[in-house]
Image: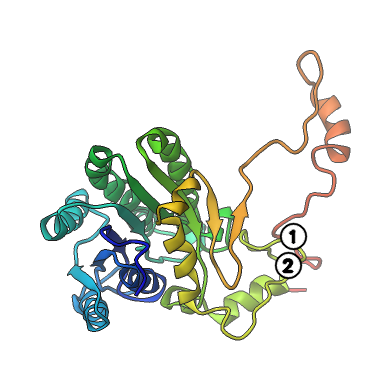
């Protein structure tokens, strides 16, 4: 076991399986006392079971680590308070928060029910607020903290995931704002774009992927015209853990307010949004002027992420 996190107390939500489990296991291996939070439900957030969290705790303890299970939901403010209370009651403090918990209710937006929208935002985005708000009194008191909010490349836009994409990109804005508010208190905050073969990614039917590809639809997390390189082992969910745990160490705190990709073998820094082109005149534009200029300026070379069919429907 390492000692990079010796004496630290970490909360990892959604730690019963997949990416969260890998993070929790490595946190414990590096000496942290870990609250393994997981509702233990289905991918869509229904049902609940204490089994997944307790199994991870048992595995950590069998390897000489320290951990305790918690089954509260991050979607409720009181649930998040109980998660933090579990850390404080058992270990006296909380130094690290990794909000990994998430659900999927994928559907094209024109078929999406209000409840499907609300449920996804409640776990991902409101869950981020709920957990952060409840750990901050302790982190502010000790003038130290490490927070990683697990966003997604899908936040850049993905077919059939309007709810998920909106929640995940909202978490990026939250992380960047928190970094500015909390940096002077010794608290770093980053948004994570993880990846890997998990229960959640496994729910996307091959037919949906094939249909997107056939229609030329570009996923927001992919670069246009650049296929993702997949090699043996690169889709292992545990590949995310070392990079995330590094960000939660003493040294890793120098990085804050960033979007960090941890999928596969690489670790990536995403650029912040900034203006890449603009047109200007001293006065108000007319539509005639914009009609003439925009195709050869702002719109030059832009790629349509979902091009119209080349043939009429049914042709």
Quadrant for residue 70, please give it. Answer: bottom left
Where is residue 92 shown, x and y percent of the image? 15, 53
Residue 43 visible within the image: no
Q: In the rendered image of this protein, does residue 203 appear above or below residue 177? A: below
Where is residue 45 shown, x and y percent of the image? 31, 68
Residue at x 58% of width, y 79% of height: 234
Q: Quadrant of the N terminus?
A: bottom left
Labelled disc at residue 216: 2
Give the Cα separation between the discs numbered 2 and 1. 7 Å
Instruction: Tell me: 291 left or right of 104.
Output: right
- Return the disc, 2 or 1, that comes first in the chain's sequence: 2
- CB under 8 Å between callouts 2 and 1? yes
Disc 1 secondary structure class: loop
Q: Which residue is mark 1?
A: 307
Labelled disc at residue 137: none
Q: Quadrant of the C terminus?
A: bottom right
Near mark 1 (Cα within 10 A), the count class, few <14, some 14-19 or many ≥20, is few
Quadrant for residue 224, please give it. Answer: bottom right
Where is residue 27 shown, x and y percent of the image? 34, 67
Residue at x 21% of width, y 70% of height: 67
Q: In the rendered image of this protein, does residue 233 appear above or below residue 151? A: below
């Amino acid at each position: 076991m390492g000692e990079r996190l010796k004496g630290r107390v970490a909360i990892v939500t959604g730690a019963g399986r997949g990416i969260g489990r890998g993070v929790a296991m490595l946190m414990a291996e590096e000496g942290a006392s870990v609250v393994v939070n997981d509702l233990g439900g289905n991918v869509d957030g229904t049902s609940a079971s204490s089994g997944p969290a307790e199994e991870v705790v048992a595995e950590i303890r069998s390897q000489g680590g320290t951990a305790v299970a918690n089954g509260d939901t991050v979607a409720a403010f009181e649930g998040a308070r109980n998660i933090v209370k579990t850390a404080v009651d058992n270990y006296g403090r909380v130094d690290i928060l990794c909000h990994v918990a998430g659900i999927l209710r994928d559907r094209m937006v024109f078929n999406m029910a209000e409840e499907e929208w609300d449920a996804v935002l409640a776990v991902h985005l409101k869950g981020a607020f709920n957990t952060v708000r409840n750990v901050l009194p302790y982190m502010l008191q000790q003038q130290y903290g490490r927070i990683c909010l697990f966003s997604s490349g899908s936040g850049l836009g993905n077919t059939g995931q309007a709810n998920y994409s909106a929640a995940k990109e909202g978490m990026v804005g939250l992380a960047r704002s928190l970094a500015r508010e909390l940096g002077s208190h010794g608290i770093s905050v980053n948004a994570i774009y993880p990846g890997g073969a998990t229960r959640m990614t496994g729910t996307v039917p091959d037919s949906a992927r094939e249909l997107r590809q056939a229609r030329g639809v570009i996923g927001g997390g992919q670069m246009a015209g650049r296929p993702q390189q997949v090699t043996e082992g690169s889709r292992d969910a545990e590949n995310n853990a070392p990079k995330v745990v590094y960000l939660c160490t003493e040294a890793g705190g120098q990085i804050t307010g960033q979007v960090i990709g941890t999928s596969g073998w690489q670790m990536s820094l995403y650029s912040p949004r900034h203006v890449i082109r603009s047109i200007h005149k001293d006065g108000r534009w007319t539509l005639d002027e914009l009609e003439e200029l925009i195709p050869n300026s702002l719109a030059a070379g832009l790629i349509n992420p979902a091009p119209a069919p080349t043939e009429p429907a049914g042709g």
